[in-house]
């Protein structure tokens, strides 16, 4: 059956070029030059896909994108002029399948049409029940679980697989971000292409450009042969950037251009090569906070975060733990070539459902591997798990609170992410509760007990990472600076800081109780005072002061420079 397409653009020559190209591909097309004409065609006829310009004489192509994507599954792509990338991203958020830039490149247009026809072919069997489709079977075999938070997640993955928009996967470590990324690729029209995963934190910074874009023979010392980069390897497929937050700033600039222009230049080459890839990225860190700290570029953040998909923690899907455990035990039996597949007793299964999984699904699998190793029989009992005994706090209220904290990913995850607040408004709140005075003598008196407790906790829960080590940092700093440790107690420092700050606050606050010189100046003064207090408490050790403030050394150094805080001036 002949495929049909609707082309919407106000440029006559461009429409004729696209119509000729589609005809050579065996596709019949209708041309509309205005938004109203396109709506008329769409209501009268059925099309396999649509291609529209964003700027039309009587309206915006975004309106057509919203109408078509909201009522049908027909893929619609947009044509954008050079420099209107923000509009293209907005169209992708509204449900557009993909976009192509002007001036129009015919190879890129052909590739877009082929991908659109693959999406249409996926939905050619409307009579099949949703649970019987190959896509649904693949989802159920890869993404284990049917809890309340998993069903909306699976439906969202099916929607994302039909699009070509960049997707950002957020979630704690061990929630299965790479599993979801592979699913999106295997369910998409790019499934015949390569899926290239890369851990951005595992590549040395000096080799990063060569790894991503490749190099030519002789371009630098050691380049004995031409090498394809990751972008070239993923051409026609999907590039998955895991731990994208670990990219250095210098590489972020080059990556931004490659994503936006869809061209790369190998080191030592004189020309750029077009690449057809889809970008998926993931990290367990909060990118919006990194943007505010100046360690991640804001423009790159909005390029890769067109659609955000938040993955739930294992604590939010405790009903899936029994079926996940059965699945992992079957995998372990197959990989270890066990004669009898191991199984969990009812008591062991119940204990797993009440465990606080900080490492999520990865921790569950590691825990089961340990239990299979320690168990002498195929039956894994509660004592083989190596978990501490349950307390009243580990029962139902804890499970309910975990579910409430991790909301289920729904169709709303396809909307634009919220803009991060300014750094100056976030800093005072983020420091609340961390600047309390520390009793050094009490820390010394209880020295043995906390060390023993922390050692025991680390053995029982190897995934626990949120340990509070600030008292030891302050105590170490006090030992290195006797003057601070003996002459000034924490309470004295606090009182002195309050006394020094009081005149400034009185001076900066007017009769109405509002900052006399404006909110920005007042917040910067408060931020400067907090940083100076932390630096004094740590003897001007910037690394320890950054930990005390709950930020990074790089961010602290940036703020000190911005606020003109100099150690020599304050001594």
Image: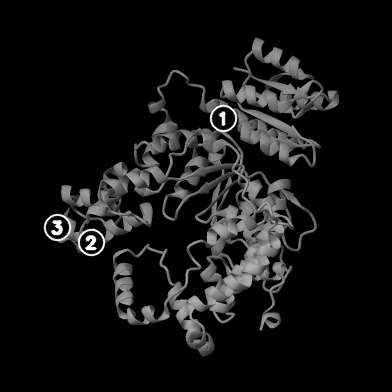
Instruction: Please name the residue shown 47% across and 45% down the image.
Output: 180
The residue labelled by disc 2 is 388
Q: Position of residue 399 (x, y in %)?
A: 31, 47
Does residue 402 appear left or right of residue 377 in this picture? right
Residue that protrudes farthest toward the top in the picture: 44
Instruction: Please name the residue shown 60% across and 49% down the image.
Output: 234
**Can the viewer see residue 173?**
yes
Is the residue marked by circle 3 packed among few (<14), some (14-19), or many (20+) residues within 10 Å?
Answer: few
Q: Earlier in the sequence, mark 2 or mark 1?
A: 1
Q: Distance between the residues labelled 1 and 3?
A: 49 Å
Foreground residue among 333 and 427: 427
Q: How far apart are marks 2 and 1 (CA)?
A: 50 Å
**Can the viewer see residue 224?**
no
Q: Assign a secondary structure to mark 1.
A: helix
Is the residue marked by circle 1 packed among few (<14), some (14-19), or many (20+) residues within 10 Å?
Answer: many
Q: Nearer the viewer, mark 2 or mark 1?
A: 2
Q: Earlier in the sequence, mark 1 or mark 3?
A: 1
Q: How far apart are marks 3 and 2 (CA)?
A: 21 Å
* Residue 513, numbered circle: none
Q: Assign a secondary structure to mark 2.
A: loop
Q: Position of residue 283 (x, y in %)?
A: 52, 54
* Residue 119, numbered circle: 1
| Image quadrant in which you'd find residue 160 | top right
Foreground residue among 471 and 238: 471
The residue labelled by disc 3 is 377
Foreground residue among 432 and 31: 432
Quarter that holds the N terminus:
top right
């Amino acid at each position: 059956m002949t495929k049909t397409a609707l082309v919407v653009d106000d440029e006559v020559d461009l429409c004729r070029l696209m119509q000729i190209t589609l005809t050579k591909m065996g596709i019949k097309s209708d041309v509309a030059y205005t938004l109203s004409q396109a709506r008329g065609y769409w209501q009268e006829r059925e099309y396999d896909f649509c291609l529209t310009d964003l700027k039309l004489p009587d309206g915006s192509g975004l309106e057509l994108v919203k109408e078509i994507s909201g009522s049908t599954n027909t893929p619609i792509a947009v044509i954008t002029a050079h420099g209107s990338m923000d509009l293209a991203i907005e169209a992708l958020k509204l449900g557009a399948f993909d976009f192509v830039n002007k001036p129009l490149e015919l190879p890129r247009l052909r590739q877009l049409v082929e991908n659109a026809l693959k999406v249409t072919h996926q939905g050619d069997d409307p009579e099949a029940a949703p649970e019987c489709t190959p896509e649904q079977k693949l989802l159920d075999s890869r993404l284990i679980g049917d809890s309340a938070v998993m069903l909306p997640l699976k439906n969202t993955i099916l929607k994302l697989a039909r699009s070509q928009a960049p997707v950002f996967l957020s979630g704690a470590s061990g929630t299965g971000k790479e599993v979801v990324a592979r699913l999106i690729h295997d369910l998409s029209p790019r499934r015949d292409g390569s899926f290239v995963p890369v851990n951005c934190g595992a590549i040395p910074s000096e080799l990063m450009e060569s790894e991503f874009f490749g190099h030519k023979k002789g371009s630098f010392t050691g380049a004995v042969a031409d090498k394809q980069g990751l972008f070239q390897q993923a051409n026609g497929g999907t590039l998955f950037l895991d731990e994208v937050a670990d990219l250095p700033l210098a590489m972020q600039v080059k990556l931004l251009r490659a994503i936006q222009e869809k061209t790369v230049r190998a080191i030592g080459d004189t020309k750029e090569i077009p690449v057809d890839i889809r970008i998926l990225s993931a990290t367990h860190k909060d990118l919006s906070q990194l943007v505010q700290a100046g360690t991640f570029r804001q423009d790159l953040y909005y390029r890769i975060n067109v659609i955000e998909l938040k993955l739930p923690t294992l604590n939010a899907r405790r009903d899936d733990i029994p079926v996940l455990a059965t699945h992992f035990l079957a995998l372990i039996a197959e990989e270890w070539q066990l004669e009898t597949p191991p199984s969990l007793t009812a008591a062991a299964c119940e204990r797993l459902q009440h465990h606080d999984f900080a490492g999520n699904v990865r921790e569950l699998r590691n825990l089961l591997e340990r239990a299979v190793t320690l168990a002498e029989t195929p039956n894994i009992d509660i004592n083989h798990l190596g978990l501490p005994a349950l307390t009243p706090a580990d029962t139902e209220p804890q499970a309910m609170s975990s579910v409430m904290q991790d909301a289920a990913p729904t169709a709303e995850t396809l909307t634009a992410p919220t803009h991060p607040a300014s750094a100056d408004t976030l800093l005072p709140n983020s420091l609340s509760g961390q600047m309390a005075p520390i009793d050094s003598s009490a820390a010394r008196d209880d020295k043995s007990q906390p060390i023993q407790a922390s050692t025991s906790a680390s053995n029982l829960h190897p995934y626990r990472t949120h340990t509070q080590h600030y008292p030891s940092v302050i105590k170490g700093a006090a030992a290195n600076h006797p003057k601070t440790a003996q002459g000034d107690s924490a309470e004295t420092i606090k009182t002195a800081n309050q006394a020094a700050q009081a005149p400034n606050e009185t001076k900066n606050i007017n009769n109405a109780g509002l900052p006399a010189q404006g909110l920005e100046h007042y917040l910067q003064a408060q931020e400067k005072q907090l940083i100076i207090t932390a630096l004094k408490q740590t003897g001007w050790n910037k690394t320890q002061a950054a930990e005390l403030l709950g930020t990074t050394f790089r961010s602290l150094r940036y703020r000190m420079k911005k606020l003109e805080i100099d150690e020599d001036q304050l001594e």
